[in-house]
Image (cartoon, helix red, strand yellow):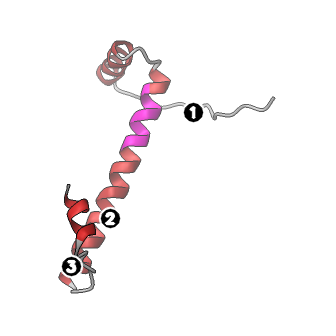
Amino acid sequence: MPRTTNVISISLPPPLNREAGIFAEKKHMTKSEFLRLTLRYYIEEQEALEGIRVARKETQEGRLKTLRGPISRLMRA
């Protein structure tokens, strides 16, 4: 059966490596699981920040569409 993951090698400063190991252990995760989760969160955060940057730019340019009516109240909740 083919492998479903790729093995990579990264370098971490010893204090960061220890901190990652301690945190992973507290959460009952392997360090690999912790680093995968951290990378996913980072990617999601960067994508969200890019969306915010685009929305701000479109707002400044007067191109952003604004929701009105019942749906807009749901979006603010």
Give the residue at x 27% y 72%: 55
Work out whether mark 3 precedes mark 1 in sequence or the reverse, and give the earlier one.
Answer: 1
Q: Nearer the viewer, residue 58 or 75?
A: 75
Which quarter of the image is occupied by the N terminus?
top right
Q: Secondary structure at mark 1?
A: loop
Mark pair 2, 1: CA separation: 30 Å
| Label 1 crowd bin: few (<14), some (14–19), many (20+), radius 10 Å | few
The numbered mark, 2 or 1, whose residue comes first in the sequence reads 1
Q: Position of residue 21 (x, y in %)?
A: 37, 16
Report the amino acid beneath label 1. Ile
Given the current orientation, which residue lies at the most extreme right position? 1
Residue type, mark 2 in image: Gly
Query: Do callouts 2 and 1 mark residues in contact (Cβ within 8 Å)?
Result: no
Q: Residues within 10 Å of mark 3 (few under 14, many from 20)?
A: few
Do callouts 2 and 3 mark residues in contact (Cβ within 8 Å)?
no
Task: Identify the residue position indicated by label 3 in the image.
Answer: 59
Q: Residue furthest bottom?
A: 62
Q: Which residue is mark 2?
A: 51
Q: Is residue 63 magenta?
A: no
Front of the two marks 2 and 1: 2
> Dot 2, how many residues are within 10 Å of its Cα: few (below 14), some (14-19), or many (20+)?
few
Q: Identify the residue under disc 1.
A: 8
